[in-house]
Image (tube, helix red, strand yellow):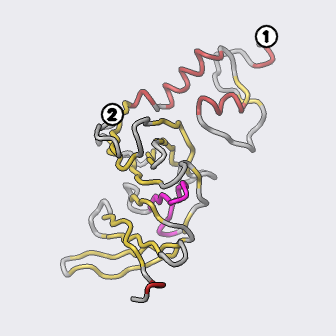
Amino acid sequence: MPEADRRTVRRLAWSNAGDKLLVALNHQSDNTSEILSFNFDLKGLNSASSFPLPFVIGSVAWHPRDDVIAIGTAGGAIVLQSLIAGPTKPVVGHDGFVTTLSWSPDGQQLFTGGEDGGVKVWNFDPDGKNQLTLIISLRQDTGGIRVIGVDPQGGGFYTGGTDPRILYWPEGRYSTVTILGRARRVVHRNMFTTEWALYAAGDDRQSKQYEKTFDRLPALSESQ
């Protein structure tokens, strides 16, 4: 193969059903990539489909339903590639390579880690205008993250990376209930969108200025 045409295999990923294999290739010549899909049966692997991508792949992960692929890029973005509808717009989450992605067992959350030492927890809504919504940003101060393992029974996840230690993140660190409770204790009233973004890590620029975040707290007009 000519030097200009060299491709590097970045990731291999089996579907949860075990009937498909993804091969993520990065093109060294123009900083693009492609994903090849193969069907697997008792006779071996058979080429099924391929799709080009205009970025360098850092990591890939199948959704538990095997109909969506989460892709982390070298530039810090996350893209959802539907096997039917095509890719979503990139959502920037990390500073540099997104090195690992992992779905929750129910497929409602996506966990991403990067060389920047950051861990992001995202809500996934396949029918929403924005399929990925950031819940919270966590940080490991001991180097880059290379792998995330989600507890199949729920309750938390583990991270490992350039530091030799394995860290455990309990669900209480990132659950929506915990975030809401912390915000309620701090502000003692309903919040503007910009305030809400500090606690829920959501920055919906098209939302209304006023957010009624808690029914049992006074409105902004009633607060001093």
Cα distance between the residues tagged 1 and 2: 41 Å
Q: Residue at x 39, y 73 (%)?
A: 8
Q: Residue furthest bottom?
A: 2
Labels 1 and 2: the sequence-earlier one: 2
Q: Indicate whether residue 10 is drawn in magenta.
A: no
Q: Which residue is mark 1?
A: 224
Quick one: 54 or 87, which is closer to the camera?
54
Which region is colored magenta?
68-84
Q: Residue at x 48, y 35 (%)?
A: 138
| Disc 1 residue type (three-letter) | Gln
Image location of residue 16, percent across then percent down: 31, 59
Relative to 69, 153 lies left or right: left
Residue 168, disc: 2
| Disc 2 residue type (three-letter) | Tyr
Determine whether the residue tagged by mark 2 lies in a helix, strand or loop.
strand
Q: Residue furthest right?
A: 221
Q: Quadrant of residue 154?
A: top left
Q: Residue at x 35, y 35 (%)?
A: 156
Q: Residue furthest front?
A: 3
